[in-house]
Image (tube, rainbow, N blue to C red):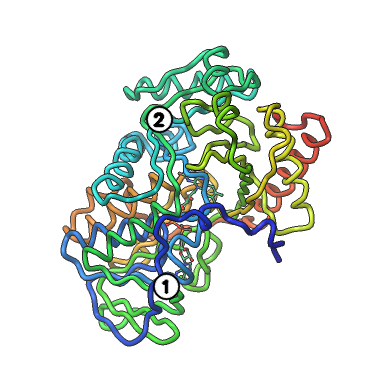
């Protein structure tokens, strides 16, 4: 059970245009059924509807209820896994294709925002991946070299320049990526949904898909009061999926990530903190992120869940971390707190599974899903509309499962609590 003070999502409170969609009732026969109303599902619905397909999207709660309405809002290029590792895991050709598709993911996100006039506080001033230590700086050097090999416009910036850009002297340097930016993620997701509706897609909230069956070469999806039938199906439930729906074993480890937001900074304070509004995260093993929202609140986040007895440890950490990076903000009240689930795969790469004829499940963005979710959703719809699999950023596999996911989840949570407790107590355990 989550305490109300840890269930106060800034993005829900500041969403530009919340939707209030009907629940699904009755029967519909369409070209494509989509289960899940996050970035992946909504981007797929929009692209499919634009290409003239009839679409039903079923969302169990509300549009953006999952990771899409809870994340940091860093629209980054590529995956968290460096591109060389992607190629060595997938093989050169497949790895190159995925790297190229995701390198241009921010272009796709920001072009959709512009094209559909999505009001989501988009700021494309780049992101700073900040080195929290000398090994962290070494990691950034390696990422820089790999990105440069692929002609990415990234810059490695010095300790002094990082100090100027962030307003903090705690980092050894940073990797700046001008392709990236920040958004209000829930507003972006709701904007994609609204654009899909405008193009003719039928989207429903409070409509959990309860079963998926194959009948007469069609997919039949039942909700409590309705049934949709279609030749094509996309399951885009990611970390919020119910494994029973697909009758599958565990496919990823659930990792939690929390955020706290300060009260708005004064104009004077804002002059000293991230004057150019970049989104930031660091190189620590238990990573941290920080960015502004549109009202000048600073958001600080890290790995961990706020639904257990040790949640206060994460809160103490957030207050101390804020004071460590920005001593002038030590007195700031944290007035929003929330967390969300990340679907982390063993190799930290997304999985695209074709679990039946023209039925796809995509998951495992491993904490980097704004660009990838938009790319995978869009390209799946393109492929379904045209029958051309080359649209996909990676070839589908027929099944996927992982072992020891519960244990791994416990490991992540215990590790983050210990790291944050140690930091809050003034000692460094793993990183800072
Ligand atoms: C706290 C946090 C911070 C993050 N920060 C970033 C970041 O800064 N940058 C970045 O790129 N990525 C980030 N991510 C990752 C990113 O948010 C996710 O990868 C992305 O939102 C996944 O989108 P999705 O559409 O695939 O899934 P989701 O947004 O999780 O949507 C899945 C939806 O499926 C619905 N659903 C589940 N079961 C059913 C059912 N049976 N029937 C109908 N609907 C169902 C759920 O209610 C949910 O709304 C972060 C994630 C978290 C949690």
* Residue at screen point 64% across, 59% down: 7
Q: Secondary structure at mark 1?
A: loop
Q: Is 188 placed left or right of 107 in the picture?
A: right
Q: Is 429 located above or below residue 206 in the figure?
A: above
Question: Which residue, given by chain and number where applicable, does mark 1 sit on?
Answer: 205
Location of residue 1 by image quarter: bottom right
* Residue at screen point 45% across, 85% down: 224
Q: Is 376 placed left or right of 270 in the picture?
A: left
- Is the residue marked by circle 2 packed among few (<14), some (14-19), or many (20+) residues within 10 Å? some
Residue positioned most to the right: 425
- Which quadrant is home to the C terminus? top right
Mark 2 or 1, nearer chain start: 2
Question: Which residue, given by chain and number where applicable, does mark 2 sit on?
Answer: 125
Q: Position of residue 218 (x, y in %)?
A: 27, 78
Q: Secondary structure at mark 2?
A: loop
Q: Nearer the viewer, mark 2 or mark 1?
A: 2
Location of residue 199 by image quarter: bottom left
């Amino acid at each position: 059970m989550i305490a109300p003070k840890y269930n106060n999502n800034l993005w829900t409170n500041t969403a530009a245009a919340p939707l209030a969609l009907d629940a699904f009732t009755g029967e519909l026969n369409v070209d494509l059924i989509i289960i899940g109303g996050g970035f992946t599902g909504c981007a797929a619905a929009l692209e499919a509807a634009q290409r003239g397909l009839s679409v039903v999207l079923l969302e169990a709660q509300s549009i953006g209820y999952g990771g899409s309405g809870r994340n940091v809002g860093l629209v980054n290029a590529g995956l968290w896994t460096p591109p060389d590792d992607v190629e060595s895991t997938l093989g050169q050709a497949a790895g190159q294709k995925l790297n190229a598709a995701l390198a241009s993911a921010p272009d796709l996100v920001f072009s959709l925002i512009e094209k559909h006039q999505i009001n989501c506080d988009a700021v494309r001033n780049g992101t700073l991946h900040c080195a929290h230590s000398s090994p962290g700086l070494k990691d950034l050097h390696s990422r820089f070299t790999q990105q440069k090999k692929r002609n990415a416009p990234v810059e490695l910036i010095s300790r002094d320049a990082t100090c100027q850009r962030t307003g903090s002297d705690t980092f050894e340097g940073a990797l700046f990526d001008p392709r990236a930016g920040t958004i209000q993620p829930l507003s972006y997701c709701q904007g994609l949904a609204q654009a899909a509706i405008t193009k003719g897609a039928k989207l429903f909230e409070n409509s959990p898909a309860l079963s998926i069956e194959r009948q007469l070469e069609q997919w039949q999806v039942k909700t409590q009061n309705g049934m949709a039938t279609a030749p094509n199906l996309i399951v885009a439930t990611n970390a919020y999926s119910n494994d029973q729906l697909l009758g599958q074993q565990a496919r990823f480890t659930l990792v939690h990530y929390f955020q706290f937001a300060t009260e708005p900074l004064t104009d004077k304070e804002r002059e000293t903190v991230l004057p150019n509004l970049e989104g930031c995260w660091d190189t620590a093993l238990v990573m941290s992120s920080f960015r502004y929202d549109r009202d000048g609140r600073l958001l600080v986040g890290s790995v961990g869940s706020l639904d257990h007895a040790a949640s206060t440890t994460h809160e103490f950490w957030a207050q101390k971390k804020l004071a460590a990076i920005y001593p002038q903000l030590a007195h700031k009240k944290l007035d929003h707190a929330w967390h969300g689930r990340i679907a982390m795969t063993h190799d930290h790469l997304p999985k695209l599974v074709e679990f039946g004829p023209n039925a796809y499940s995509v998951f495992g963005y491993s904490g980097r899903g704004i660009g990838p979710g938009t790319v995978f959703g869009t390209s799946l719809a393109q492929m379904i509309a045209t029958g051309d699999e080359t649209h996909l950023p990676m070839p589908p596999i027929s099944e996927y499962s992982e072992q020891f996911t519960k244990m791994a989840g416990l490991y992540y949570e215990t590790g983050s609590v210990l790291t944050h407790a140690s930091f809050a107590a003034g000692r460094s355990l793993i990183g800072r």
